[in-house]
Amino acid sequence: MLCAIGWQGRGYSPDFTENMNAIVLGRLRADPATEVVFTMEADSICGPCPSRRGTGCVSATRIAALDRRHASALGIGPGQRMSWAEAQARATERLRPQDLERICRGCQWLALGMCQAALAKLQGGQ
């Protein structure tokens, strides 16, 4: 969820970027009523990621830690469903951009500041 909020069109590979654009730009941002389902394993976003292995990832330990921190900070669990609008509202209510330093520790995209800026913008800070 936080990765979709911060999505800026830069991904792990051309196929991953195309898929993420289709999901985030073509579905979630185009229709905030779109239902999202939270999972703790590889999903439709992970589909073409070069690190995906079945329902897992070559970076499973790191990704699982990120997923646990995200889920805890957002108060969500596997199988939970809500609209994209509700998911964004949950993030804006529960998080501050600086919280991502802790929640997203270990993410290669964190240092670029895209997610912090996107969350601040969503909260009306920019």
Image: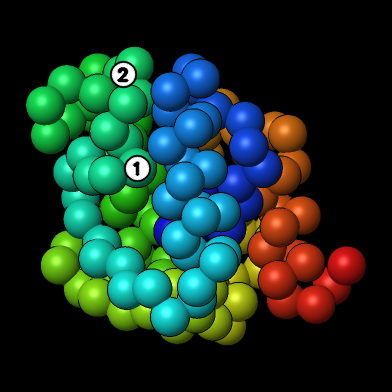
User: Percent from the top left, x then y, of residue 111?
Assistant: 70, 33
Image disc number at residue 45: 1
Residue drawn at (38%, 73%) of the image = 34
* Residue 96 seen in the figure: yes
Between 69 and 46, the one lying in front of the other is: 46
Above-or-below relation of 20 to 116:
above
In the rendered view of the protein, which quadrant contains the N terminus? bottom left
At 47% from the left edge and 46% from the top edge, which residue is drawn? Answer: 22
Closer to the chain start, of discs 1 and 2, is 1
Q: Residue at x 35, y 25 (%)?
A: 49
Residue 122 drawn at (x, y percent): 70, 71
Task: Count numbered badges in the picture.
Answer: 2
Whether residue 104 is visible, yes or no, is no
Q: Which residue is mark 2?
A: 51
Query: Residue 54 is drawn in which quadrant?
Result: top left
Nearest the eye: 58 or 86: 86
Q: CA distance from mark 1 to mark 2?
A: 12 Å
Label 1 is placed on what type of residue?
A: Ile
| Location of residue 123 (image quadrant) | bottom right
